[in-house]
Image (cartoon, rainbow, N blue to C red):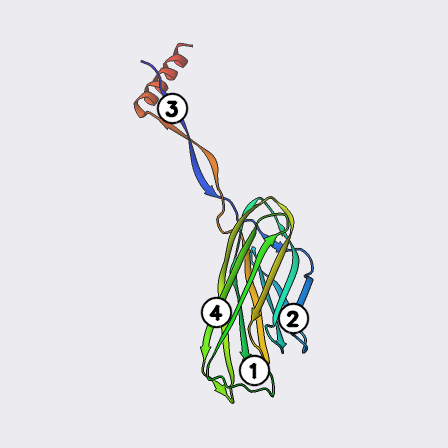
Amino acid sequence: MKLLLAALFLTAASLADPVAITWNGPVVVESLTCGGCPYGAYAPEVTPTLDGLNADLSVSFGSSAYGYGPSEGIEIQIPFEVTGDAAVAITGTAGFGAYGSSAPAYGGTDLTSWNFSGGFAGAVSVVGADSIGFAGTQTVESDDCTYGDCVASVGSDQPVAGELNLSAGTYTLDIQESYWDNSIGDSMAGAGVTLVLSDPTPNAVPEPHLITVYDGGILLLLLLWLAFRRQGQ
């Protein structure tokens, strides 16, 4: 009778710990432009925070303008660190809102309705890697007209979502966003982005486990054989 002892190696998947992502330096405003803004653009507000293993970021900027077709654009950069190889998810929302008028100050028209339009566009990227674009527009018809000067507001927001495979190291996040509207008179507008950088899907890491299986009858025969040999020695 052959002695059969079987050892089985099984592979069980266990989840690796999520990789931490942290901000690693100051925010730098690379550029800020504002067309038709004699009253000036508001200083951008940038708030980086940490939420457990995730890095959160809030960016907002705006302007008070006068003149046809005001617009504003911004670019900011902030360094961050990835503590291990990860598929870093960048998720959030970008948007804008604007309030405008159809006539210059002290210059009424004979309008009884007016189409007010505005939009925004931008991109989030890791410098040296792919970018995640976003854009949105809205047009409304306003009949809120006093002495021929019509006023209206528009707004839009869009999701921001993408994933970048990054090795452990330090990177620079770049955010660009601009907006515009077709206001002719006084207007106010603003835009912003909220983002979360995270490692939401940990990789499954194989771990070997040794499971030894014994046949009970064969094990009994083995023990009897060993006892017999000892008696014969």
Question: Residue 188 appears at what percent x and percent y?
Answer: 58, 77
Q: Earlier in the sequence, mark 4 or mark 1?
A: 1
Q: CA distance from mark 4 to mark 1?
A: 20 Å
Q: Compared with residue 189, is residue 158 higher up or lower down, i.e. above or below?
A: above
Determine whether, in the image, residue 186 is placed left or right of residue 157. Answer: right
Identify the disc placed on residue 6. 3
Cβ atoms at labels 3 and 2 below 8 Å apart? no
Crowding near pointer 4: few (<14 within 10 Å), some, many (20+)? some
Q: Earlier in the sequence, mark 3 or mark 2?
A: 3
Determine whether, in the image, residue 121 is placed left or right of residue 172. Answer: left
Crowding near pointer 1: few (<14 within 10 Å), some, many (20+)? many
Identify the disc placed on residue 35. 2
Q: CA distance from mark 2 to mark 4?
A: 20 Å
User: As rendered, which of 116 and 213 lies closer to the eye?
Assistant: 116
| Pointer 1 residue | 103
Q: CA distance from mark 3 to mark 1?
A: 89 Å
Determine whether, in the image, residue 97 is placed left or right of residue 173. Answer: left
Determine whether, in the image, residue 199 is placed left or right of residue 7. Answer: right
Which residue appears at 43% of the width and 37% of the height?
Answer: 12
